[in-house]
Image (cartoon, rainbow, N blue to C red):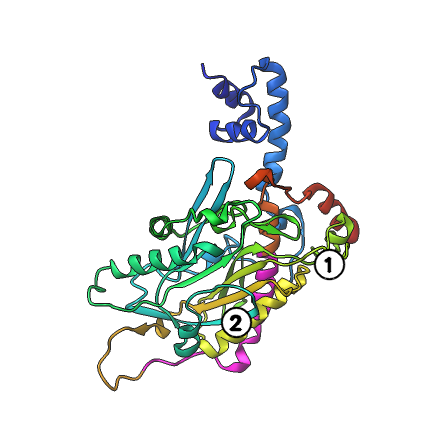
Amino acid sequence: MDEVLKLGIITGLNKLKIEKIIATQQIQTMKLNPFPLIIFILLGVSQLVFAQKRPRELGIPFGILPAGPLNAITDVAGIKIGQLTKVEGAHIRTGVTAILPHGGNLFQEKVPAAIFVGNGFGKLAGVTQVQELGTIESPIVLTNTLSVAAGIEGAVRYSLNQPGNESVQSVNAIVGETNDGYLNDIRGMHVSSQDVIQAIQSAEEGPVEEGNVGAGTGTVCFGWKGGIGTASRKLPESLGGYTVGVLVQTNFGGNLQIAGVPVGEKLGKYPFKDALEKSDGSCMIVVATDAPVLDRNLERIAKRAMMGLAKTGGIASNGSGDYVIAFSTAEGLRIAYRSESGTLENTASLRNDDITGLFMATIEATEEAIINSLFAAETMVGRDGHQVEALPKEQVLEWIKQANN
C-alpha cells in the first residue's frame, strides 16, 4: 500500500493534504521510518488545521455588520471567480484572478461601475472609459504588472468569442496588477492570453480560494506573504438587506494593524524602522454589491474601500498602485449594448441618504479581506532563492487575545 495512503488512514487526512505537508517540509525524497514520519505528519496536521481557519473563525473581531454565508465576494449573487496559479520551477510564482460580475454576456449587458484611484503608481487598464461611461463590459482581470497586456488580450479575445458579439470591434478590458517581481520572474512574462482565458472560463460561484493563488501567488504584504483575500457584509433588512462583497490582491506596505493591535510594530516590520526601508507596493480592491447603485455613488463606495485599507495599516505610499473597482449587479440597472433609439435607461437607484450602510459594509469587508489574505498565505520561496515568510499567526492571535481581555 502507498505509504502516503497509510498515513491518510492513520491521520484522517486525504492524500493531497498529506503530500502538501510533506512537500512543504521538503522531505519528499527522504526515506524515513514510518513512525517518526507519522509523528511529523501529526505535527503538520495541527498547523494545517490552524491554517484552514479564517481570522473570524479564530476569534478576531471585524466591525459590527454580519458577514454573508461564504464571507466572500461571491455572496453577491451571480458573481463568479476564476483563478489560474503558475508555480513552475524555481522562479515562476504568478497567476491570474478573474472576476465576472454576472454569468451572462457582459458586453451585451453592462453593469454600472466606478474606479477610484487611491494612489496611481500602477498600470490599471481600462480606467478612462469607466470614468467616462460608468460601466464595465468585460470580466475584470488581475495579474502581475508586466502581464497587463496579456490580460487585455485574453479578456478581449474571450469577449469577442462570446455568442452575440460577432460584430463587436471594441472592448474595454479592465486589467489590474501588482508587481510580484520579488518572488516571481516577472521579466519572463510567463502569463499568456490563454492563461487569462482559462481563468475566466473556470470562473464559478461559491467559496473563493485565498492566499497564494491566482494573481496573489507571488505577492508580499506588510513584509509578509500576501495574496488573494475576500470578505462580505450583509446589511439588515431595515437598511435594504443588500450585500457587499470585496476581493483584494494584497502587495502593499505599511504598519500592519489587526483589530487595532499594532502587529507590524510588535513584529519589527514597519516602514521607516530603518532609514532606507521601503513600504511601496500595490493593492487591487474589487467591490461588488447587489444594491441598485449607479456610477456616481459607486465611486463614493469605492473611496470607502481605502478606509478599510487604512484600518489595516496601509499608507498608500509613493510607489503604491492602490485602485478600487466597484460595480453593482442589480439587474434593473444593467445597460444593454443595443436598444431602440430614444429608449430611456432605468435609473431607479438608491438615494444618497440610503448609501451610508453600504459605506460601512465596504470598509469592514475590505479590512477583513486584507487580513484574510495574510492568514491564508503560506511561506514561499521564489526567484533567486528569495523567501517570504507567512505571518506568524499564533503570536498575532495571542496579542489580539490579550488586547481584548
x and y percent of residue 388 in the render?
62, 43
x and y percent of residue 153 in the render?
34, 58
- Magenta highlight on residue 365: yes
Label 2 belongs to which residue? 116
Three-letter residue code for mark 1:
Gly
- Identify the residue at horizontal 45%, vertical 14% (top origin): 1
- Residue 260 is labelled as 1
Inter-mark Cα distance, 1 to 2: 26 Å
x and y percent of residue 16 in the render?
47, 30
Where residue 392 sits, quadrant-wise, is top right
- Residue 369 is labelled as none
- Magenta highlight on residue 134: no
Q: Is residue 364 visible?
A: yes
Q: Report the side of 336 relative to 123 (left or right).
A: left
- Sequence order check: which comes first, mark 1 or mark 2? 2
Q: Report the side of 404 relative to 161 (left or right).
A: right
Q: Circle 1: is it few (<14), some (14-19), or many (20+) Cα within 10 Å?
A: some
x and y percent of residue 47 in the render?
63, 34
Q: Secondary structure under badge 1?
A: loop
- Magenta range is 345-369
Q: Main secondary structure of the magenta part?
A: helix
